Image (cartoon, rainbow, N blue to C red):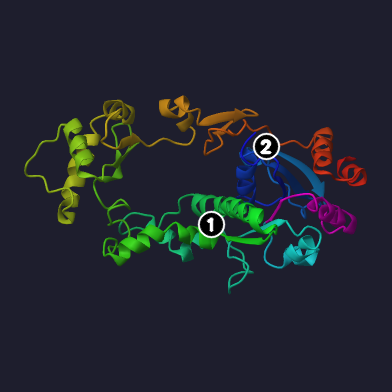
Amino acid sequence: MGPLHGVKVIEVASLAPGPFGAMILADLGAEVLRVDRGGKPGEGIVSPEGPLDRGKHCITLDLKVPEDRDTLLALAEHVDVFIEGFRPGVAERLGIGPADLAARNPRLIYGRMTGWGQEGPLAHTAGHDIDYIAISGALGLAGRAGEPPVPPANMLADYAGGGMLLALGVLGALFERERSGKGQVIDAAMVDGSALFTASMHGLHHLGLWNFPRGENMLDGGAPFYDTYECADGQYLAVGCVEIPFYNQMLAILGIDDPDLPFQLDKNGWPQLKEVLGAKFKERSRDEWAEVFAGSDACVAPVLSPWEAPDHPHNQARDAFIEINGVRQPAPAPRFGRTPAATPAPLSADPDQVRKLLAGWGVDAARIDHVTTP
């Protein structure tokens, strides 16, 4: 059933971080109703179906139509969590802002998912993942020495610093509501979340341990023992043997025993060590090296594509990937010993299923008919 069994969520359709945060809640057992924004062609937002919509039900409402807006307000009286991803002020203009919903449901937790947050000079401007991680400092950490910063896809702000932060905020607010009996507003901004992930780097910088340019520090590809190396087949290995015993084990497995090699932590010797390791790793293919290092503490792993990852033996043993509607995708995480999450079902817009869901929420029959009658 999942640890959030019984929690009711409305998610106003948006893109990327909002759906991801709501997916996490659905994975953990919450009942999530996605509201697609109808209207004239080109005006509404209907999220593409896929992994981010698993475990959810959906309906369509045109929020510019008073009757549909009133229906959404009525539905919100019966839920615990409301999630929207509008720019600041838009929900208020539509009449579904935090004050509008709190007047009907003071226990409601209202999650606001934005890039720049609800205030600040950039709050009302457009942006994407790459922009948020740019000013948070996160993008400046990613890339090779002497080369431009490299965006890590759109994972860091949209999903890690966005949707994940939103889900965490919802969980915190649900816990606090048990004491106060009151809901509250969550301002989940991707710029804040991506900055949060740089906390340890700020600490290392203060200690003088992260003061070199991008790509020249211990954990950003600058060190020979924390980098990727090309293999004979053009594929790559990830090497992360930071601790000296693990580093020595890697050298032993590689058959490198040269007393004249620089010490592991001698930064001046890093270029030479990289050259030696690079030449060695090019002697075999990625999968050959993966087999050689399997079961060791050398901290060497094959760099897999997301499409290869489900076939790795460790991921298979843990059932880390599942298939829904023919699409392989990551399984719900984390795992709970007493209240495990169920395998998610595909997104459902089936009127009978929606009627059953809303009836269980205590929604009156007229509202149910309004959203389920073609």
The C terminus, quarter of image: top right
Q: Amino acid at mark 2?
A: Gly
Furthest residue to the front?
Answer: 179
Query: In the rendered image, which quarter is residue 91 located in?
Result: bottom right
Few, some or many residues within 10 Å of mark 1 (<14, 14–19, 20+): many
Few, some or many residues within 10 Å of mark 2 (<14, 14–19, 20+): many
The N terminus, quarter of image: top right
Q: Position of residue 293 (x, y in %)?
A: 27, 29
Magenta stretch: residue 306 in it? no
Query: What residue sits right under mark 2 in the picture?
Result: 55
SS at mark 2 in the image:
loop
Asked if residue 285 is positioned above or below residue 157 in the image, the reply reads: above
Q: Position of residue 102 (x, y in %)?
A: 76, 62
Q: Amino acid at mark 1?
A: Asp
Furthest residue to the right?
Answer: 366
Please report the bounds of the magenta region as a residue range.
Answer: 62-84
Give the camera-side residue of 227 and 361. 361
Residue 235 horizontal side relative to residue 1, left or right: left
Q: Position of residue 170 (x, y in %)?
A: 62, 53
**Residue shown at 56% from the left, 58% from the top:** 128
Query: What residue sits right under mark 1 in the picture?
Result: 129
Label 1 – label 2 distance at C-alpha: 26 Å
Give the camera-side residue of 146 and 8. 8
Whichever of callouts 1 and 2 sits on the residue coming sooner in the sequence is: 2
